[in-house]
């Protein structure tokens, strides 16, 4: 059975979203939500969930390079809990320490959807076809 999975790179200003499926195990950038208020964010996410019908959601969990937690670690966990509570889908956290670092970007480029694709790809690499 093929399952669609949506991946999220949570940020205070933007949320990057990627999608992929368990058949190919490949993630691709989907979109960036630039809305700051939660009502708008979750409305857009709800529309994407209705459109793609994912079996699960994956959220990047940022940490310091040494693995220590910081403010965004807790915010990302809270976001993951909100996703689970609002949409009743399984949500998994994935270590995202290096997701943005592997993307070569120019100053001002919005890379959140690409970072979400890297996070989702990390999930697929660890869980699909193993």
Image: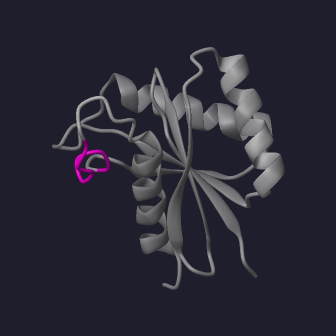
Range of residues picked out in magenta: 99-105
Furthest toward the left, the residue is 66
Q: Is residue 111 found left or right of 49 in the rendered image?
A: left
Task: Give percent across and percent down for residue 18.
Answer: 55, 53
Between 55 and 115, the residue placed more toward the observer is 115
Q: Quadrant of residue 81?
A: top right
Q: How is the image coloured?
A: one colour
Q: Is residue 75 above or below residue 53?
A: above
The residue positioned 35% from the left and 39% from the top of the image is: 62
Looking at the image, the residue that sits furthest to the right is 50
Q: Position of residue 55 (x, y in %)?
A: 73, 61
Q: How many marks?
A: 0
Q: Is residue 6 magenta?
A: no
Asked if 2 appears above or below 88 in the picture, the reply is: below
Which residue is at the far top?
A: 37
What residue is at 67 percent from the left and 37 percent from the top? 83
Q: Is residue 104 magenta?
A: yes
- x then y, percent, for residue 57: 63, 52
Residue 74 versus residue 26 in the image, above or below: above
Q: Judge left or right: residue 109 versus residue 47.
A: left
- Kindly identify the residue that appears in the image at 71 percent across and 21 percent down: 40
Identify the residue at image location x=43%, y=27%: 74
Q: Which quarter of the image is occupied by the N terminus?
A: bottom right
The chief SS type of the magenta part is: loop
| x, y percent for residue 120 | 49, 58
């Amino acid at each position: 059975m093929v399952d669609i999975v949506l991946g999220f790179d949570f940020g205070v200003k933007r949320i990057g979203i990627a999608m992929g499926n368990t058949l190919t195990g490949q993630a691709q950038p989907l979109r960036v939500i630039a809305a700051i208020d939660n009502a708008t964010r979750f409305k857009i996410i709800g529309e994407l969930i209705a459109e793609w019908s994912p079996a699960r959601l994956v959220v990047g969990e940022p940490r310091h390079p040494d693995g220590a937690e910081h403010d965004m670690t807790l915010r990302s966990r809270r976001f993951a809990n909100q996703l689970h509570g609002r949409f009743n889908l399984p949500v998994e956290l994935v270590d995202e320490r290096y997701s943005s670092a592997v993307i070569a970007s120019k100053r001002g480029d919005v890379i959140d959807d690409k970072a979400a694709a890297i996070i989702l790809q990390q999930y697929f690499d660890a869980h699909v076809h193993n």
